Amino acid sequence: MSPEGSTVTFRRDTAEARPRALARFARKLQAEVAKGRAFHCLITGDAEMRRLNLEFLGKDFATDVLSFPSWAEARQTRRSAPLSGAGLLACLPLGDIAISMARARAQARRYGHGVEIEVRILMLHGLLHLLGMDHEADGGRMARAEKRWRARLGLPEGLIERVAP
């Protein structure tokens, strides 16, 4: 992590999203959503997303966003007590988020907003996963949190709402 906290790394330069603006957004998410916990976000292509999805989740296809909790965070979500007090967890990074720029571009076109807005939606979704939420198994908790945060952050419809019946 950088001295500023959460970071965003682009595999390739793009005119569709402003790296500094997305880095500021990541730090805003860190401060407001993650309560100070830093994370890293990689903006990459479909080939790398497919490789990561296959290597870590056993799924052989590219996807829009993946979340990889840090070792400490993954362990914490399976336990009810902190590893070594709240102070230790507060200084450890939450983990990493990977976002496909190709998927963000296609989804932005489909939903009628800019690519940078779509990356922000994906970053928020990935961060909520890093915080231990799982929309496939939590009875709507993540969907409610995502909707609440999107409203606060001025973001349009999120991923969970797009696939809801």
Image (tube, grey):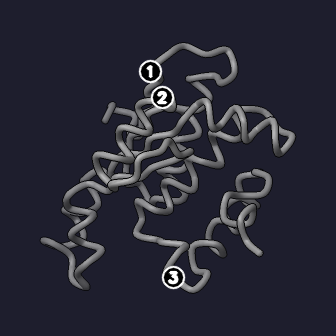
Question: What number is the disc on residue 138?
Answer: 3
Q: Residues within 10 Å of mark 2 (few under 14, many from 20)?
A: many
Vertical position of residue 14 compared to residue 21: above or below = above
Q: Outermost residue toward the front?
A: 60
Going by the numbered disc 2, the residue's amino acid type is Thr
* Label 1 close to label 2 by CB (< 8 Å): yes
Does the image show residue 94?
no
Q: Earlier in the sequence, mark 2 or mark 3?
A: 2
Q: Earlier in the sequence, mark 3 or mark 1?
A: 1
Q: Outermost residue toward the right?
A: 112
Mark 3–mark 1 Cα distance, whole angstroms, equals 33 Å
Q: In the picture provided, is 42 more to the left or to the right than 52?
A: right
The percent position of residue 128, horizontal first and vertical second, equals 50, 62
Going by the numbered disc 1, the residue's amino acid type is Arg
Q: Residues within 10 Å of mark 1 (few under 14, many from 20)?
A: few
Residue position marked by numbered label 2 in the rendering: 44
Residue position marked by numbered label 1 in the rendering: 11
In terms of depth relative to the viewer, which is nearer, 126 or 52? Answer: 52
Q: In the picture provided, is 80 more to the left or to the right than 46?
A: left
Which element carries disc 3, helix, strand or loop? loop
Quadrant in which the N terminus appears: top left
Q: Residue at x 21, y 69 (%)?
A: 75
Q: Residue at x 54, y 13 (%)?
A: 13
